[in-house]
Image (spheres, grey):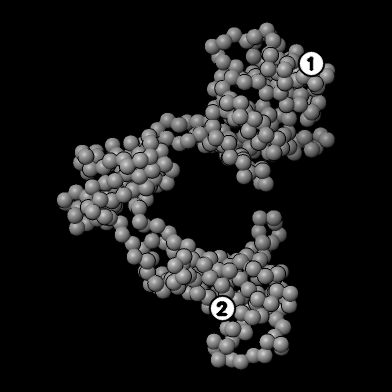
Amino acid sequence: MKNLSSSLLRLFAGLVVALVVASVSTEARADKLRDIAEVSGARDNQLVGFGVVTGLAGTGDDSSAPIAAKATIEMLRRLGISVDPAQVKLKNVAAVVVTATLPPFAKSGTKLDITVSSIGNAKSLAGGTLVQSLLKGADQKTYAVAQGALIVGSGKDKQSTTTAARIPGGALVEREVPTSISSGGEISLSLRSPSFSTATNLVRAIDQSIGEGSAHAKDGGSVIVKIPAKFKDDTVGLIAKLEDIEVATVKKARVVINEKTGTIVAGGDVRLAPAAIVHGGLTIVVKDPAAPRPAAAPAPATAAKGKGAKGKQSAAAAAAPAAPAAPAPAAAPGVGGEGAPVRYLKGAASLSDVAAALGTLGLSARDLASVLSTLRTAGALEAEVVIE
């Protein structure tokens, strides 16, 4: 139990460090326009296609997934080779889906990175080669052609798999997508994270750079810029000038918790309103700094009902003398008793302070997610909680 508690404490020490780094102030800070907005119309397009991977060492699709064999026969027919379907029993071939992203302004011959994923029951794509595959857009037109040797992960950890692979530069663009960056003498800028404050600051910064009245906010997510006369024939030059403008931005307070990996990231000014938290043998009281410490802590006492002696001891601990004290050595998870740790935090305490207090119990990411979600529901956590 002691070794388990030590391991959990080390895990949460890392989480607390991440929270301290991530819990930054929402005071406006300057970002380049290129980092917070993009020109409307200059967008990516998704491509998808079907293909066949060959050269597998007996790890391809078997007879229970005949799509690979049928695709191979069709490919050979296109090459002028006739094959009897009854004689085709391949285990070194796999049917795959090929995906890629076509960036704006991509010209014919531009190379794209592609992802290849098995759709049959192949055990591994390691050592395979993708045969020429057509990549189509949503309009069913072919925009790129993919082919090449696959790069597959080791498959030794949970985050990697051998049934999906990548081919850097594995596709060639064959058809260009017409892109328009201006219309009616105006350029539309779209914010990546819509915000009325950021949109207003963006308009102000553009007016200061190219002239008063040059921009106006259409809504919280888009800003319209009039093309000045001197940039009438140089729209690209105008956009390049706009990209270097510094804009004051405000980040939204948000906490993202990934239960699978145990990762917790807090962005923006994540703070807590006065509240009381009782979890196992630990009581955390977030109090208003302007208010005197009460003789008894009603919230912990109420939350501890039904826990017998443990709850009474936590409530009694919450009524400790007014002088703040460092928490006592952490008890084992779920164990109360004399000397149950009590931590007092000032109002608007940062999330990292509360996470550090909860971490003394060695809580799992799932438990911490539950506590934070409950605080959000109670209105005590001034941030959005996203659980993945």
Q: Is residue 94 above or below residue 75?
A: above
Q: Residue at x 42, y 46 (%)?
A: 192
Q: Residue at x 83, y 18 (%)?
A: 309
Q: Is residue 168 visible?
A: no
Q: Quadrant of the N terminus?
A: top right
Q: Nearer the viewer, residue 80 or 323?
A: 80
Q: Is residue 15 left or right of residue 242?
A: right
Q: Nearer the viewer, residue 64 or 282?
A: 64
Residue 290 lies in what quarter of the image?
top right
Residue 261 in the image, given as x and y percentages of width and height: 66, 46
Residue 312's disc is: 1
Q: Quadrant of the C terminus?
A: top right
Q: Residue at x 64, y 68 (%)?
A: 119
Q: CA distance from mark 1 to mark 2?
A: 71 Å
The amino acid on which the numbered mark 1 sits, given as a three-letter code, is: Lys
Q: Secondary structure at mark 2?
A: strand
Q: Is residue 210 above or below residue 355?
A: below
Residue 331 in the image, given as x and y percentages of width and height: 78, 26
Q: Is residue 174 above or below residue 375?
A: below
Residue 234 in the image, given as x and y percentages of width and height: 22, 57
Q: Is residue 183 above or below residue 203?
A: below
**Which residue ends up furthest to the left in the rendered image?**
229
Residue 131's disc is: 2
Q: Is residue 70 left or right of residue 142?
A: right
